[in-house]
Amino acid sequence: MPKPFPTTVLVLASGFLLIMASSGCGRVELNDELEYPDRTSPVVLMEKHPDQGPPGFPPPGKPPVSVDWLVARGVSVLDPSSITTVAWASGWMAALKEESGRHFGNPGKPRVGATDTPSIAALSAELGMDETKLAEGSRLYRRLCVQCHGVTGDGLGAASLWLSPAPRDLRTGDFKFISAAEHKLPTGFQPLKARPRTEDLVKTLRVGLEGTSMPSFALLGDGPLESLAAYVINLSCRGELEQAVITGVLRQDKETSQAVAKNPAQEEVIRYKRMLSTTLEWEDPEADVDDFMAKLPSPSIKLYAEKYIDRMLREYIAANKNPIPVPAYPYSEDKPIPPASIIAGHALFKAQCVNCHADYGRQSDLRFEVWGSVVRPANLTLSRYKGGRRPIDIYYRIARGIPPCAMPKANLGDSAPAKAGWDLVNFLMALPHPEHLPDEVRAQVYGGSLSKKSGTTP
Amino acid sequence: MSNLFINTSEWPFYIPIALSIFAVLMFALSKAWPRAWSILFGSTLLAVLAGTMVAAWAGLWLPANGASFGGEVDLLFNLILVLTTFFFILTEAILVWSLWNHKPPEGKSPSAIHGDHRLELAWTIVPALLLAGIAVVQMPTWARMKGAGNESWLSTRYEVGSDKADLLVCVHGRQWEWRVRYHDPTLPMPTRPLDWAAKAEPTDLHAVNEIHAYPGAKVRLLLRTHDVIHSFFVPQLRIKQDMLPGRTTPAWFIPTPADSSRENRWEIACAELCGGNHYRMRGQVVIHPDKSAFDAWYASSAGEQSRRKRSEKAVASAPKAS
Amino acid sequence: MSEHPTTGHHAPTGFLSKYVFSRDHKVIGIQFMFSAVIFLLLGGALALAVRLQVGYPEEALGILTKAFPFIGSRVPPEWGGRMSPEFYTMLFTMHATVMIFFVIIPWLTGAFGNYLIPLMIGAGDMAFPTLNMLSYWLMWPGFICIMASFFVDGGASGVGWTAYPTISSAATAHGELASPAARHAGAGHVLWLVSLLFVGVSSLMGSVNYITTVTHCRAPGLSLWRMPLTVWSLFITAILQSVALPPLTVALMMQLLDKTAGTNFFLPPGGLGFGNWSTGPGGGQPLLWQHLFWFYSHPAVYIMILPAMGMVSDVMVAFCRKPLFGYRPMVFSMAAIAGLGFIVWGHHMFQSGMDPRLGTGFMLATIMIALPSAVKTFNWLATLWGSKIYFSAAMLNALGFVSMFVIGGLSGIFMAATPVDVVFHDTYFIVAHIHYVLFLSSLFGIYAATYYWYPKMFGRHMSEGLGQLHFALTFILANCTFYPMHILGIGGHPRRYYDPTLYEFLQPFQPLNRFMTVSAVLLGLSQLIFLANFFGSLVFGRRASTNPWNANTLEWEAPSPPPHGNFENAPVVVRGPYEYAISGSTDHLTQTASGA
């Protein structure tokens, strides 16, 4: 029955197998050669939060920022991909790419500050961002964070559109949960953004953001978490510089056009000045820009980039040095919260917070965040706190607000701000537990009877 | 960075290639010597046995048991392992022997046996008895693992007797982490644990991804989820229980680590597909050396949770393992 | 002999009616077979991508783009140089779906069932030829949906082939297709459900047809107890399918409605929350799906193994020239497996939160199902004992089936024991078990049957040499690929993990993972030998005679390949199928041969 088998077929077959098996053993391209892709997502310029809120949360699978909604509400949105249609700008975008690579490296070899800028290197060292730490952070980021937050920190990773709240876009330099007090830079300027302290970032990484898809990474250990936080600052600075340049390039208003029309030969200078002045306040804007222009043979943002990075790092350092002052707790630490404090906190809440946290947050209206994404002011009856559930965390939120969501800091008055602050905290801590509220407060929050159902919704 | 390339010089790479060459050789040999096929079968089956033994010897085996009922589970596993290995060797040996000893095609015909009633009876009844035996011996263990029986601190209804438990822990699975909530062990246990699981008390201790206990503690878990099914799996505790949306599923364990003089840390894994980051639901069960160490951890975590002062250290904020 | 057997339809004349929309059971069988072979390629490629990711979690995408440069430019930049975990969930989900619903079931019951049943019972065609044609062409909407699902928004289904709610069924209150629970649970998953609905209806039509054909169209003299085991197994499988498929169809419908029409069959009363999205309140029960699904899918495991058991018995007997040992016990044990198969579904749910007392009952039934499997194994061994053996490619695959089914069966006992299942549930031990049953048993059975009946189907032999080489490589490499999974499972390695190196207790197992990956790649490559052999032999194969294996059953009375109507003269059966080694001089007696 079995037909005699030709030996040639055997030899050919085994040879074929071995060749197939040994191909693909060479060098493979790995993610250390990864490059940061160019920005394509829209730049939302939310100078002031629109009066009319969004119609809802974007559904699963849709981008977290709906350009249509924003434009309809008068928010200007820039499209970075339109830069290619602006002839004069493309040279500067190439320059941006070069500067960005020079100062921030690539995901495989991140750094802050080019080798020839010792001043920036000193600042990043002060922030604890040396290259080994950044390399470790970047490696962890690419292993654990990139799926949601994306390679550039744009919050548009592969899974991001199926998460709500959407993963944070780190590139704007805005952070929500910060414990830095409002302060001025040593030079006397306002910081460009409300910067977080490094420990705020580490805390977020450690405990996650309850109620969102941001999990806890505490099991990585302290060292790796600090590296990750350093890399987050690195990504954020890189994105912020990119966004500043794109904004400057694309924000060509009527004034610029008129100036160019008057003096076409000076077009480049005029546009450049315009770009710089819209994005960064300078110690002496006119002199600085002219000085730069004198040195610049062609479109370059070398000095601009250095200046901007320098400024950002100084702001992070200043934030670290300016924590929110926390007044001593005016009641006894060991005793239960006094009812009078809850009642006082309730009064403060009704005066200042119910506008947004309508019905204690159970019927809050949606708002836009500075990124153009949608947020619902927290439902405070759920005992779920994104920014942390310790009294001190709640105090920070009250004392500083949440700048990117336009949540203002509470006005605690001048007479006894410490007591007022802690009263509000005490009220918020007791709010989810109707059985712990004084009767008069409970009646207002939960109605007359003690309802068991409240606060158990998912 | 770990290895950048496929490491072609390690055994996982070259042994499969060597084995393919062995297969081709056996095939080539079989043309002249059909018994090569019995070598192919026999060597593969021997390799399977040997490989299992090497793996067990190298520690690639059941993780060291750390639960009160784990010993029974392991005993049952070993019992089944012995029985199945016996039948594996028996059947495969008959098969390989039949191949080795086959009659040549040109030889005289084998005897035309259509069956044997006694043989059929024998190989039906003997496995039936063994299987029934396995079925019976495991029932008490199963009942105990799932919380039946008359231990007063456990109950399938989970509304009575809870006051005897040492720790009551609600584990809330989310995409993709475990939110853990302890009932304050210094307070009396709630009379209605399911209500407590549904609604936090101000005195509860909240933690993420970490469950702390101490040797001998009677730990009752109430498992919940509000998004998709997760499964709470701790290999060392021999515990695996799905969390069903809309339900509170009970589970329990008493940690009995082999070496309780040190802190034991066992990883929690999710065992039911819960989305892309299913593999990321890594948690830890921390077994402190004794109750006092646990109490110290609890007190410091509870203190941290009620912190009203700014931390002096640059980085310190959350309840954290000691 | 008597007159030409009836087919119920005339011989087709046009090309379309002859080869495409044919009502001839042989053409339909071959159509099923070709679709299954093509889907085998797809399923295998998906499996290799899965294995690469688990073996080399950091490098898998780099290796893939290196090996296949054309995918390099198609990798989404947001993946960051690694495969995204969501994509990985899609890979293993679609691997399982394709292999189970588009390869093994169609190949075993669709291809061989259609081709062999009429031939082996001496009928001219199926009882309902048009229904038969419809059963194949209903596969096509299934094919189209499942292929289309790869290209829709969010990608193909990635919720596991078991599609457990609520990850699969969750939908926002506004009724978008995109799921709030997972990226790969949106439009792709809806298509998955639709596809399976079509496949299920197709199988249902096939099984009704098989049952009727076997009960009504047998040749004169072919009593039930003279039917070959292949026909018995396909008959029992058809009964299994016809009972088990309706619940699955219902369950698929329910999930489809949950996804698209806002029903709440699997949504718990409190609803589900996914951050800012919520499903709104429900009123159903996620566990219901598991009951319905496993009520089908556990019998489905037997649907995927019983026909292979029957065919392997026939192949084995032909190549060891000895009567089958214990013909009736073999039939009874198949019937027992089928019967018990309906009351064991709960063993998939021991850890699901089902009442543990129910688990005890399911455990008893499950343990007892090992018994008929053991009886079958012992009977095969007794058949082999002291026989002549022709080591043909078909026989080797049949032997591979028997030896590997032992491992698959024995490992099942661990999971049947409820306390041990606590450790092994949803670990790689299950993956090992299912692959020993489905790959190393069912697929070996399929290969054996293909080598054995290929001469009848196409009138040409497949190359024996390539077939034997293919077997040798497959046997060794499949063991290398799947056996270490047992070890991983014992160590507690959960299945469906994208990157096991995250866990300290899994890191020692990573070399084994790489070993399995390398073996799997080689295994995948060696299947190309089979494909080359399969397609090459259509043209270059040696011509086959009517009865090349000197076998007894009726299909070997028909010419190779059989013409329309199958038999020139309707066969009349005078004896059972396994009359070999009658006496010193008579090697075998066919079922129709007079004498001795």
Image: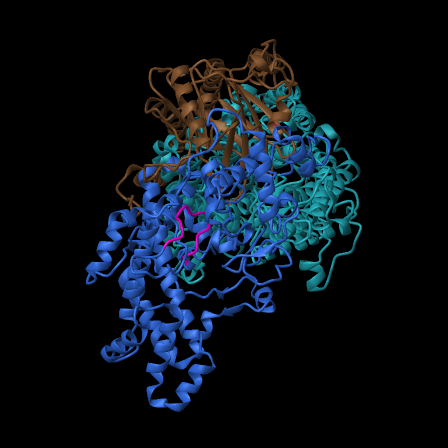
Colour setting: by chain
C135 or A95: nearer the eye? A95
Quarter of the N terminus of chain C within the rendering? top right
Chain coloured blue in the rendered structure: A
Main secondary structure along the magenta-highlighted residues: loop
Report which colour depicts chain C. Answer: cyan
C419 lies above or below C503: above
x 30%, y 59%: residue: A104
Quadrant of the image occupied by residue C166: top right
Q: Which residues are magenta?
A: A173-183
x 60%, y 64%: residue: A69
B304 or C157: nearer the eye? B304
Q: How many marks?
A: 0
Chain coloured brown in the rendered structure: B
Quarter of the C terminus of chain C within the rendering? top right
Within the magenta stretch, is there residue B124?
A: no
